Amino acid sequence: MGLKETWHFLTRSHAETGEKHSDESLQTRYYKGNKDKVIEAIEAVVKESGYTLKRTERERGEIIIEQSSGQRFLLVASVITVRPFKTAVDFSCSYSTVLPSDFGKSKRMLDAMYKKLDKQLVYIGSGLGEQLL
């Protein structure tokens, strides 16, 4: 981890995934299945984890998850069908804390969500956007 990444780690209470993220574990992940199947898998992971499913917007491919007791956070999942039976999943997580940092909790949350999804769905790869165009 370079100086820039260390500084971000110490001053952020938010993490999100992206297609060309510098951290490979936070790159967009692609799964085999249609959008509805992937959304159902995310909802199952949320219920299994004990979090609150606040809202699901199937048309937009967006799922909003929160935990309002204990360590509070807001997690947003974005699901996009790239090709038939190839669906991309991105997450954005923000922890509510009085400190300027969550000390990596939001990143660990995203890693845990991806690992749980890997068990539910067929994982194709990460950061494949340019290959699928």
Image: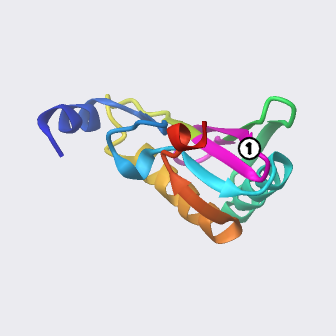
The C terminus sits in image quarter: top right
Q: Going by the image, does 34 lie left or right of 133?
A: right
Query: Is residue 82 covered in magenta?
Result: yes
Q: Please say if 37 is above or below 4.
A: below
Q: How many marks?
A: 1
In the displayed orientation, state which residue is furthest to the bottom: 119
Residue carrying label 1: 83
Which of the 4 image quarters holds residue 57?
top right
Callout 1: few (<14), some (14-19), or many (20+) C-alpha neighbours within 10 Å? few
Residue 73 in percent (x, y) is at 56, 39
Which is more toward the observer, 6 or 73? 6
Q: Residue, x 86% and y 37% (percent of image)?
A: 58
Residue 19 in percent (x, y) is at 48, 37
> What secondary structure is the stretch in magenta mostly built from?
strand
Residue 76 in percent (x, y) is at 64, 36
Q: Residue, x 39% and y 38% (percent of image)?
A: 21
Residue 9 in percent (x, y) is at 27, 38
Which of the 4 image quarters holds residue 10?
top left
Which is more toward the observer, 64 or 25? 25
In the displayed orientation, state which residue is furthest to the left: 3
Q: Please say if 131 is above or below 62.
A: below
Q: Residue, x 85% and y 49% (percent of image)?
A: 36
Which is more toward the observer, 131 or 50? 131
Q: Going by the image, does 40 lie left or right of 95?
A: right
Provide the secondary structure element on which disc 1 rests.
Answer: strand
Kind of residue indicated by mark 1: Arg
Numbered range of the magenta stretch = 66-90
Res 88 visible: yes
